[in-house]
Amino acid sequence: MTLYRKELEEKARAFVKILNDFDIKASFDENSFRDYLAIIKSDYKGKGILKANLNIYYKPSRKSFSLAKKIKDDEFEKAVLAAWDKLNGFESHSAESGIYEAFVDGSYFNGITGYGAAIYLGDIVKTKLSGTVENTQSHQIGGELKAVMETLKWCDENNVGEIRINYDYIGIEKFAAGVWTAKNEIVKEYVKTVLMSKVKIQWRHIKSHSGNTKNNLADSLAKAAIESAKKQIQ
């Protein structure tokens, strides 16, 4: 008996349907399931030239899915990722809308707090921001908030009118909206930065470890900043 087959099959069938909408011929058979894994065979534009296996993994402890794939063609990969984002409610604003998307994250390890932010316009990465936070009392939370502050600073410097900030730490929106009270210095600085920024902000919560590749990029930037800081110390 395949572990979590029901959850995997439901997700796989929904993904196959959306992949077809993105000009990707996709299918899976009854023998494609493994424990925690469903394998979808895909063929871009149905021409038999560009093919790939798309592996959907299920993590029961988080009740979340992730996608793994090896695709060498950029156009094919973008189509797959767009389909995955649509499936999970991660769709981004189009470049034509003029609304930017920022994915922010923070990390903490051995006394060092890092932050990372990836800013997009449509599917194009406009910039990547990363670094460390001097005040480490808030640990990872400090990195999460710093990522937003640096994002808004970049927006103000580059005349960005509107941006959607995608986050996994709910305090990012709660503090900004005044639902949670700012008590320590870094949170107070964060709230002040948000209130003073001229950019119009949309907020969207994205569950961590949910397979969003853009959010994963922000996470990797935060971790890379920590690794870089560790090397400078050594």
Image (cartoon, rainbow, N blue to C red):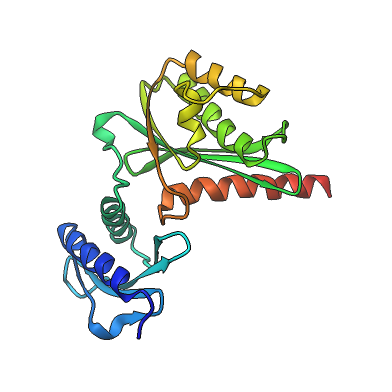
Determine the residue positioned at 59% across, 31% down: 146
Of residues 68 and 158, the one drawn nearer to the viewer in this rendering:
68
Residue 164: name its quadrant: top left
As displayed, is residue 63 above or below residue 117? below
Determine the residue positioned at 60% across, 25% down: 187
User: Which residue is farthest right?
Assistant: 234
Horizontal and vertical percent for residue 85? 31, 51
Of residues 233 and 14, the one drawn nearer to the viewer in this rendering:
14
Residue 69 visible to the viewer: no
As displayed, is residue 71 above or below residue 108? below
Determine the residue positioned at 40% across, 67% down: 58
Residue 163 visible to the viewer: yes
Determine the residue positioned at 40% across, 74% down: 36
Horizontal and vertical percent for residue 87? 26, 55
Of residues 147 and 64, the one drawn nearer to the viewer in this rendering:
64
Horizontal and vertical percent for residue 27? 20, 74
Of residues 152 and 95, the one drawn nearer to the viewer in this rendering:
152
As displayed, is residue 4 above or below residue 181? below
Q: Quadrant of the N terminus?
A: bottom left
Would residue 154 appear left or right of 122 to someone viewing this image?
right
Horizontal and vertical percent for residue 228? 70, 47
Would residue 127 appear left or right of 230 to someone viewing this image?
left
Residue 131: name its quadrant: top right
Would residue 208 appear left or right of 22 to someone viewing this image?
right
Would residue 227 appear left or right of 162 to someone viewing this image?
right
* Numbered disc total: 0
